[in-house]
Amino acid sequence: MPAVAQNFTIPQGSTSQINFVVDPPVGETLLGTQIYWSVFPLLLDLPQLPAVIRKSLDNGLQVNDPIAQTFYVNLIQADTEDLPPGNYYHEVVVTDPTGALTVTTEGVMTLTQRATIDFTVPVPVNLGLGTGIFAEVDAFLPASVTGG
């Protein structure tokens, strides 16, 4: 039975490391296995084909400790930057040395909208007293300081 409700949230276009533990374990070790992590769009809470992200050993997925059965997935900006914000189904499938497939993890990846900031455009800043956040401060300052 897979570990269910392995849910996480990341922003679009982020670089992230997602850590996993195979529990219950698949055999004694992850040595000799193949591990696949896939992400699918959800429609009415049902996964839809095709997968929008796929990772496997040495292709964005690395085993930390084969005996403890821990591994991680590296997401790069290109993996999620063009995906619309929303919920996605994700799962881990492990193939043991005999070829038996086991779904070890499943859950929801929530992709949040990334705030786009163009750092090449100057941002106007109003530091004048008496406006914005400084209006509350001005109430406590003497008129000689605020110019009033």
Image: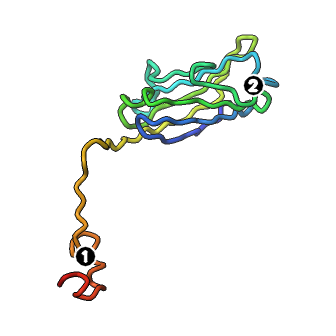
Disc number at residue 26? 2
Give SS at disc 2: loop
Residue shown at the point (65%, 34%) measured from the top left: 20
- The amino acid sitting under disc 1 is Ala
Rendering quarter of residue 106: top right
Rendering quarter of residue 27: top right
Relative horizontal placement of residue 7, taking residue 131 as reference (left or right)? right
Give the mark nearest the N terminus, 1 or 2: 2
Residue shown at the point (75%, 15%) measured from the top left: 32
Relative horizontal placement of residue 62, taking residue 68 as reference (left or right)? left
Disc number at residue 135? 1
Taking the view exactly as shown, the residue that stands out farthest to the right is 28
The reply to whether the C-beta atoms of the residues labelled 1 and 2 are less than 8 Å apart is no
Rendering quarter of residue 31: top right
How many circles with numbers are drawn on the protein? 2
- The amino acid sitting under disc 2 is Val
Q: Quadrant of the C terminus?
A: bottom left
Disc 1 from disc 2: Cα separation: 63 Å
Taking the view exactly as shown, the residue that stands out farthest to the left is 148
Which x, y percent locates residue 101?
Answer: 67, 17
Residue shown at the point (45%, 36%) measured from the top left: 14
Relative horizontal placement of residue 101, taking residue 15 as reference (left or right)? right
Q: Quadrant of the N terminus?
A: top right
Q: What color scheme is it?
A: rainbow
Which x, y percent locates residue 67?
Answer: 80, 29
Nearer the observer: mark 1 or 2; the answer is: 1
Give SS at disc 1: helix
